[in-house]
Image (cartoon, helix red, strand yellow):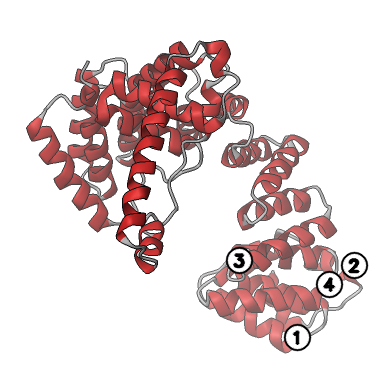
Amino acid sequence: MNTLEMSDDELYETGIKVLTDKLGASEVPRFIRQCKSGKGDYSVDRHKLLADQPDIDTIVNRIQDRRAAREAEERARAKRFAASQSEIRRMTDIEISEIGNQVLINKLGAAGFIGFIRICQELNGGYPRDLIENRAEAEENIKLYTASLNFNPKIVEGYIRRGNAYSYIGEHDKAIKDYSEAIMLKPNYAKAYYNRGNVYRDKVNFDKAITDYTKAIELNPDYAEAYYNRGKIYVEEDKYDIAIQDFDMTIELEPKHADAYGYRGSLYRDKGEHDEAIEDFNTEIELQPDDAGAYYERGKIYGTKGAYDKAIDDFSKALKLHPEFTEVYVKRGLAYFRMGRFESAIQDYNKVLELKPKFTEVYAARGIIWLHIKEWKNAKLDLTFARNLKVDVIAEFHKIYESVEDFEQRNDIQLPKDIVVMLK
């Protein structure tokens, strides 16, 4: 058995089988929970010993005592290792870890043992093995895995990780080649298809991406991220119903997948199913309370439903998290306008133009709001400026009022003639 040539899935499955055979199925979770990255300082004991040097006779006695204790521990360890599964169930976590480590090393070898433990550490929330944080790290990985593949061209995870590094630096064709090599070595390896699908997605080759995601799902029906990424492509292709089905599966497999709720909520909103959309955004916010975008999206739905107080509350929460979220000021300004809170609306539009001076439609919107508080000079300035910037101010006005007469009747305001001319 060459564990270097195994995929991560095969290595993990083999390791679990080895542990189950020795420890029993009920004790395997206890072993896995103990697989965590070390945080201790292993030099502490040595420094303490050097700081308190005993005399030579004491050192000799300690060595003899430790040798005897070590021999006794070796006998006890051998007895524990030979124990039945019923006896193992009564052992401490440390003893189970010791036995599990030994059987893994015996079966998988040192390299396989290290690989299995790293997988378990990631499952326990440890540092993701495939995470690349910068270009320098990606380039270093390319050198590392190229060297290992030159030594043994059958290391499937070498192709996967080098492909990940190529993908990170935008070398998409090289990444695809590496994932394809991994597929040739392991035709039933779902992760290789999934990773290649991600690169095809980045190349905007959606047909091939969907094909790879679908193959990954066929090989691993519980592959939540494959459903999720395929669903996002269906959104790009305006296939909302199929996309919702994929997000349904993502959520079924991973009930805490916040982004899947967000995507599905957006689709429900676009389909006019506002209550379902709000429910999904509620869950997304519960799972990710610091996501400004979720508050923004839910606020837009409340605005569409005419629940302006709730919309403003959500927009304000979004802005607290992301003070330069320009689109939120626009939507909150509109909500203030709908509620007749014209001064607050103007403040929001002022902020929009402070952040994005070229947001030309806002000049027209602010100009229309000035009309409601009879600030004729400011209204004319904004409407004229917007018109000079090629904004159709008449069309913007007619989004709210059917005509000048409609405005005057609904607001009991007589517009100046020069402004009436601008709006007809």
Instruction: Tell me the kind of residue under disc 2.
Output: Gln
Disc 3 to disc 2, C-alpha distance: 39 Å
Q: Nearer the viewer, mark 4 or mark 2?
A: 4
Left or right position of 218 against 158: right
Q: Secondary structure at mark 4?
A: loop
Query: Are circles 4 and 2 on residues that touch, CB within 8 Å?
Result: no
Q: Position of residue 141 (x, y in %)?
A: 21, 46
Mark 1 packing: few (<14 Cα in 10 Å), some, or many (20+)? some
Q: Earlier in the sequence, mark 4 or mark 3?
A: 3
- Above or below — where is 326 with respect to 251? below
Disc 2 to disc 1, C-alpha distance: 18 Å
Q: Nearer the viewer, mark 1 or mark 4?
A: 4
Q: Secondary structure at mark 1?
A: helix
Instruction: Tell me the kind of residue under disc 1.
Output: Trp
**Quadrant of the image occupied by residue 338:** bottom right
The label on residue 322 is: 3
- Above or below — where is 85 with respect to 241? above
Q: Earlier in the sequence, mark 3 or mark 1?
A: 3
Q: Nearer the viewer, mark 2 or mark 1?
A: 1
Q: Earlier in the sequence, mark 2 or mark 1?
A: 1
Disc 4 to disc 3, C-alpha distance: 23 Å
Residue carrying label 1:
376
In which quadrant is the N terminus drawn? Answer: top left
Q: Earlier in the sequence, mark 1 or mark 4?
A: 4
Q: Earlier in the sequence, mark 4 or mark 2?
A: 4
- Above or below — where is 56 with respect to 114? below
